[in-house]
Amino acid sequence: MSKPISVKADIVPYSKDYARVIRSWIDSKKTYKDVCRGNNYPPPQNVIETWQRKGVTSYILFSDNKPVAYGELWNRPHELAYEIAHLIVEPTIRFKGYGTKMIELLYQRGVSHKGVAKVIINLFKDNTTTLGCYFKAGFQISSTTNYTEGLRLVKLIK
């Protein structure tokens, strides 16, 4: 059993007022590729706004009144699931538990919807640095992804 995350933070619905800050967290070609399979670094100025669409609910993690992470829940009704996507943490605090906290809170939001049996994450094959974060949040490898080389992780409702 993994130990609880001690980071004190909470998520709030995304506001476009934070788009520029979140975009600034895409600090390298590798980060851009890991977060959204982006290839043309730097990303366009409106990249975060292009992620906002029907079936996607976006959140910002705040700690000490500052935005520290961003993530999305994609509704996957045909799978009775929500998918966590576009997870990114402010660069100076990566690997300090904020990503895991964000995943835990997104999971809680996803499973609070009626008819949801699981939450999934698709991990691209070249983004293995975040795998430990997903394991800490209680996700397990279930299969390979359908549309790109990588792994599919799942956490069922308990």
Image (cartoon, rainbow, N blue to C red):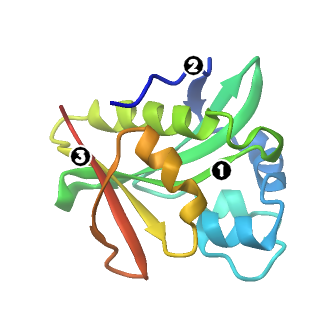
**Crowd class of label 1 (few under 14; some 14 to 19; many from 20; radius 10 Å):** many
Say what amino acid the circle numbered 2 marks.
Ser
Q: Is residue 57 something that shows in the picture?
A: no
Q: Nearer the viewer, residue 9 or 50?
A: 9
> Residue lying furthest front in this view?
1
**Crowd class of label 2 (few under 14; some 14 to 19; many from 20; radius 10 Å):** few
- If you read the primary sequence from the N terminus, does the residue marked by circle 3 or circle 2 appear first? 2
Per the model, the C-alpha gap separating discs 3 and 1 is: 21 Å
The mark found on residue 41 in the picture is: none
Per the model, the C-alpha gap separating discs 2 and 1 is: 19 Å
Q: Secondary structure at mark 1?
A: strand
Q: Residue 83: where, in percent of width, then height? A: 37, 54
Q: Residue 30: where, in percent of width, then height? A: 73, 71
- Looking at the rendering, which quadrant does residue 10 occupy? top right
Asked if the residue at tag 1 contacts the one at tag 3, i.e. Cβ–Cβ closer than 8 Å, the answer is: no
Mark 3 lies on residue:
118
- If you read the primary sequence from the N terminus, does the residue marked by circle 3 or circle 1 appear first? 1
Asked if the residue at tag 2 contacts the one at tag 3, i.e. Cβ–Cβ closer than 8 Å, the answer is: no
Mark 1 lies on residue:
88
Give left or right: position of 34 versus 142: right
Q: Secondary structure at mark 2?
A: loop
Q: Residue 26: where, in percent of width, then height? A: 78, 59
Give left or right: position of 62 versus 27: left
The mark found on residue 6 in the picture is: 2
Determine the residue positioned at 45% across, 39% down. 136
Q: Quadrant of the N terminus?
A: top left
Per the model, the C-alpha gap separating discs 3 and 2 is: 24 Å
Q: Residue 2: where, in percent of width, then height? A: 39, 31
Q: Quadrant of the C terminus?
A: top left
